[in-house]
Image (tube, rainbow, N blue to C red):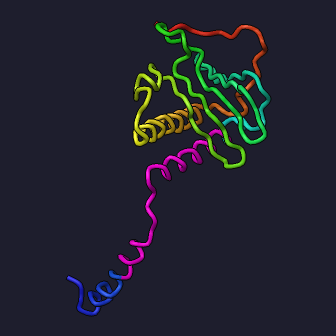
């Protein structure tokens, strides 16, 4: 039990603390998604500095037998189109799995996973004409996946030092099975 003089101090301070907390703005789902884009940009920039790469294919090899491929598809003044994937193909579709298409916004410092392939396409997951809330939810899942994947890659040791440009010839791929 607190002495009487201590309880009066706490009683007086509590309404002020509650009033301050009421003025903290809350993020809506769209705001949360934009924050994910910003985090993904920071992670991607730290890992591979893709804004500085020329168009082409790059490989990051850390000696674990599972190389990461970064395709710089197009570069524009304000955006860079990328694809991250391993050299593993889905045996049913022939597509690299997992893979993520990423649009890097240089000026806004955001990176958006526009398409992810982890066993299924977005149309198979949410349909051709989903309601807006479902689109936002799907984008949140894709970009959360991208953020976790980038974090995992950094923990494994991938980065600018392990990234090398691949020649225009054949690239080794492994068919999962």
Judged left or right of residue 41, residue 119 is left
Q: Is residue 55 magenta?
A: no
User: Which of the 4 quarters of the picture holds residue 168?
Assistant: top right
Q: In front here: 81 or 58?
A: 81
Q: Is residue 23 magenta?
A: yes
Residue 110 image position (x, y, % from top left): 63, 45
Q: In front here: 130 or 136?
A: 130
- Counting the numbered discs, the total is 0
Please report the residue visible at 54 percent of the width from the left and 49 percent of the height from the top. Answer: 34
Above or below, 154 relative to 31 = above
The quarter of the rendered structure image containing the N terminus is bottom left
Residue that sits furthest to the bottom in the current view? 5
Residue 9 image position (x, y, % from top left): 32, 88
User: Which of the 4 quarters of the picture holds residue 74?
Assistant: top right
Residue 27 image position (x, y, % from top left): 45, 57
Residue that sits furthest to the front in the current view? 129
Q: Which residues are magenta?
A: 16-45
Judged left or right of residue 133, residue 97 is right
Please report the residue visible at 64 percent of the width from the left and 35 percent of the height from the top. Answer: 103
Q: Main secondary structure of the magenta part?
A: helix
Above or below, 129 relative to 121 = below
Above or below, 146 relative to 6 = above
């Amino acid at each position: 039990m607190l002495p009487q003089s201590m309880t009066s101090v706490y009683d007086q301070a509590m309404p002020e603390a509650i009033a301050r907390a009421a003025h903290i703005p809350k993020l809506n789902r769209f705001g949360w998604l934009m924050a994910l884009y910003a985090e993904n940009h920071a992670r991607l920039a730290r890992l591979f500095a893709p804004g500085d790469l020329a168009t082409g294919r790059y490989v990051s090899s850390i000696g674990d037998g599972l190389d990461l491929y970064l395709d710089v598809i197009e570069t524009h003044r304000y955006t860079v189109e990328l694809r991250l994937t391993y050299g593993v193909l889905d045996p049913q579709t022939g597509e690299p799995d997992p893979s993520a298409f990423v649009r890097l916004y240089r000026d806004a410092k955001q990176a958006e996973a526009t398409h992810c392939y982890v066993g299924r396409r977005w149309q198979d997951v949410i349909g051709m004409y989903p309601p807006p809330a479902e689109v936002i939810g799907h984008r949140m899942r894709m970009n959360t996946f991208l953020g976790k994947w980038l974090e995992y890659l950094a923990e494994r040791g991938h980065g600018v030092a392990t990234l090398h440009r691949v020649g225009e010839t054949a690239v080794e791929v492994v068919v999962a099975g």
